[in-house]
Amino acid sequence: MKTNNKGLIVITGASSGFGMEMAKAFAKDGYPMLLLARRVEKMEAMNLPNAICKKVDVTDSTAFEAAVRDAEAKYGKTDLLVNNAGIMLLGEIANQDPLEWKKMLDVNVMGVMNGMQIVMNDMKARRMGTIINVSSVAGVQPFPTHAAYCASKYAVSGLTQVARGEMASHNVRVLYICPGAVGTELLGHTTDKAIIEGYEQWKQSVGAVNITAADVARTIKYAYELPQAVSLREIIITDTMQDA
Ligand code: NDP
């Protein structure tokens, strides 16, 4: 078992999907963690050692920061922040409710910016630390019905590259990972049922159904466990059979 003598690991969106698998993977190696999401009971049910679970909406920067500071008081400063919390509400621009765009931009972009600001200055001062932002293949290429989601994920890809520049001379790593389609709860929040069906049909038809959330989680863990001097700046990870 590895333990982290470098400090705390903070994972947002740890109640489901990639975040939940990351929490399990890091817990196996004894890392101290702060797990954040709105459904705190789902995180608590994992019953992981050295893990503080807090009900936090990442758009609430005050609550987000308070949770991080409390956990840091117990486990030391944050050495890894994974800005993973996100939502995907697909739709066509001409018809989609603009409130869905706003929700997505708030969580997927503002949530990430909030998290970065909370940990960056301490990382700079310590001259160590890693921030991993979860973008998407939809953050580097367009997909039909993904306009606002693409807008949010292109933003994550772009802002991460700027942040990497800000933090490089301070020896702090800032990376982003762009997963392709992976079966989690993500698609289920889209309100247009025809879009959900079309998405599932495409995945089945190309056979892009075998990559798992655990595969994404262990890739993130791998990037973190490389030496501080090694930065896997951009990772694109998809099912081998994903054709777009
Ligand atoms: P899930 O829907 O399974 O998990 C999303 C997580 O984000 C949940 O834990 C949810 O918790 C949390 N979350 C959502 N909104 C908020 C909020 N306002 N505050 C705090 N937590 C929040 O999806 P995935 O695991 O698939 O998604 C994780 C990330 O990966 C997202 O950023 C997504 O965009 C990205 N991604 C996913 C892909 C996929 O195909 N699965 C592909 C590419 C990128 P709760 O509801 O309890 O708050």
Image (cartoon, rainbow, N blue to C red):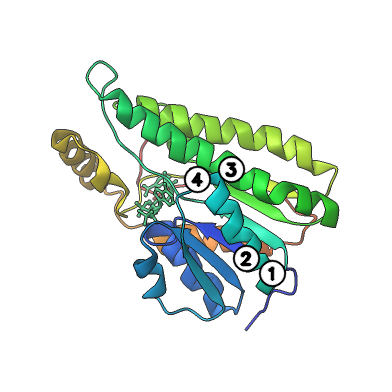
Per the model, the C-alpha gap separating discs 4 and 3 is: 8 Å
Q: Does the CB distance between marks 2 and 1 fall below 8 Å?
A: yes
Q: To which residue does mark 3 refer?
A: 114
Q: Nearer the viewer, mark 2 or mark 3?
A: 2
Residue 62 relative to residue 169: left or right: left
Amino acid type indicated by mark 1: Ala
Q: Does the CB distance between marks 4 and 3 fall below 8 Å?
A: no
Give the number of the disc on residue 100. none
Residue 8 on image: x %, y %: 66, 67
Residue 186 on image: x %, y %: 32, 48
Residue in the foreground of this view, choosing between 10 and 224: 10
Per the model, the C-alpha gap separating discs 1 and 4 is: 20 Å
Q: Is residue 142 above or below residue 157?
A: above
Q: To which residue does mark 2 refer?
A: 70
Q: To which residue does mark 4 refer?
A: 60
Amino acid type indicated by mark 4: Asp
Per the model, the C-alpha gap separating discs 1 and 3 is: 20 Å
